[in-house]
Amino acid sequence: MIVLTKIILRDVKESDWDVLVRIRNEPDVRNASHNTSFFTPEKYKEYINNQISQNEKNCHWAVILDENEIIGHAKIINQELGYLISGRFRNQGIGSKTISLLFEKAREIGFSEVFDIVKVNQPISLWVAIKNKFTMIGVISDKNSIPYAYKRVMNLN
């Protein structure tokens, strides 16, 4: 277990793509994501750049441990927060710290509320959302009307 000293969000750099896509393609990370596709670095970069180009307030950051190691990826897309953390850094409070930093970024961008969508088969992610005071506002179902995810909101005021 690591001793958590400092987590920051840093704008994604060109040199980050290989590490970010490696983390994104970890089986547990990929399966927790809404888009469970396996990405190449080029496709992941294209996927992210497409999100950024849709809205000037959409942002992506590398999650950095102790100012030098990329351990995950965080984003705000259309007021929805999202993050992924490499499996070897889970269950250490990093998700909660990342959410806290995303709240700060969302306020800087000018949002008064943000959303979180958690797949129903991700109880730890749901627990982190509850712990961070997100309020349930709905259930998202798949095309067969089977519950797929919980939509939650956080008022930032």
Image: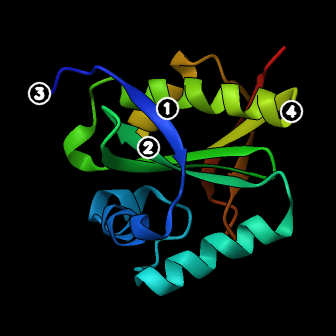
What residue sits 42% from the left and 36% below the top? Answer: 123
Q: Distance between the residues labelled 1 and 3?
A: 18 Å
Q: Which of marks 4 and 2 is in front?
A: 2
Give the x, y percent position of residue 71.
32, 47
> SS of the residue at dot 2?
strand
Instruction: Tell me which numbered mark, 1 or 4, is placed earlier along the sequence.
Output: 1
Mark 2 surroundings: few (<14), some (14-19) or many (≥20) residues within 10 A: many
Give the x, y percent position of residue 103.
67, 27
Q: Hey, what amino acid is under mark 4? A: Phe
| Left or right position of 50 against 1 | right
Q: Name the residue under label 2.
A: 63
Q: Mark 4 points at which residue?
A: 111
Q: Mark 3 points at which residue?
A: 1
Q: Name the residue under label 1.
A: 98
What residue sits 46% from the left and 37% below the top? Answer: 125
Mark 4 surroundings: few (<14), some (14-19) or many (≥20) residues within 10 A: some
Q: Hey, what amino acid is under mark 2? A: Val
